[in-house]
Image (cartoon, helix red, strand yellow):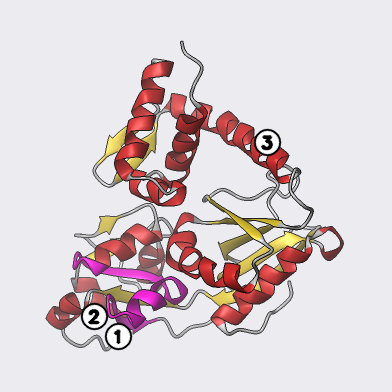
Amino acid sequence: MRTPNLNALKMFDAAARHLNFRLAAREVNVTQGAVAQQVRRLEADLGCKLFRRKARGLELTDIGRSYFGPVRRALAIIDDATDKLRPQGATLKISVTPSFAAKWLVPRLSAFEQANPGIDVQTVATEGLADFRTDSVDLAIRQGEPPTSDGVRVEFLAPLDLCAVCSPGYAETIGPVRQFADLTIHRLLHDGHNHWARLLEEAGLGTQTGHVQFNQTALAIEAAMNGQGIALVPWLLAEGDIARGKLAEVWRDSRSGSNGYYMISPQLQNAKPATHTMIEWCKLQVGTRARSG
């Protein structure tokens, strides 16, 4: 068995976090084919399959799942060692979900870099929870209820603000949507957060048939833009495509709650100055005032 190539391990790490070669390629700035080729080469070197190829993405095999954890930790150690060679405070490592990275953060990063040329931003796109003690992460942004862990600082970024979106062409075919129940006769695009299932159950409408399931919100949004149905997603992730005319908003959940997007970082005395800079910049981007957690 040959020693795995470091570049192949990085491609495997990105593919394992996204469970999608296209999104992994976007993160590491290569073609989708290059990621798939490196993963195949790694599988050949190891003599085992790491992924199962599925119609709408990837699934780790049992061997792939057990291999992913140590590889992720090893790459984090390398990143941490490299960070320590740079001037203190010049590097900011931010952990976000793949969909938040693709639909909100990455399109805005160039503006942050222009405003803060002295800060080198490293983005880690993962669904997993960040551990500030072992992952060398300076800031995490997650969707859900406000975290209550001790020893961290929590800043409110944006409400969940769910909206139903589809392509403009698809919107023309469904007619007016006067209430939530009007949506249920159409093709619903589900993501890993199961917002459709929760709202349908709350409305007493039960499980609907004819829906399509994706593991990530960004994929559901992509399918909606391509006229495949209606996705139920946070407005924060859809606003850019709505503004560009790629998506049409046909319904919005008017209820408010504590569920939303939160920025989590070490307590002030342990945080880098760059972390505070990123937090304030994010809040300005969404136009909200912080609610400390």
Q: Are marks 1 and 2 in contact (CB under 8 Å)?
A: yes
Reading the chain from its start, which is encountered first: label 2 or label 3? 3
- Residue 15 sits in which quadrant? top left
Image depth: mark 2 or mark 3 in front: 3
Q: Are marks 3 and 1 in contact (CB under 8 Å)?
A: no
What's the mark number on residue 77?
A: 3
Mark 2 Cα shell of 10 Å, populated few (<14), some (14-19), many (≥20) = few
Q: CA distance from mark 1 to mark 2?
A: 6 Å
Residue numbers of the magenta segment? 225-252
Q: Is residue 54 left or right of residue 239?
A: left
Task: Name the element at disc 3.
Answer: helix
Q: Amino acid at mark 3?
A: Ile
Mark 3 Cα shell of 10 Å, populated few (<14), some (14-19), many (≥20) = some
Task: Name the element at disc 1.
Answer: loop
User: Is residue 237 inside the magenta stretch?
Assistant: yes
Q: Amino acid at mark 1?
A: Gln
Q: Amino acid at mark 2?
A: Asp
What's the mark number on residue 179?
A: 1
Task: Name the element at disc 2.
Answer: helix
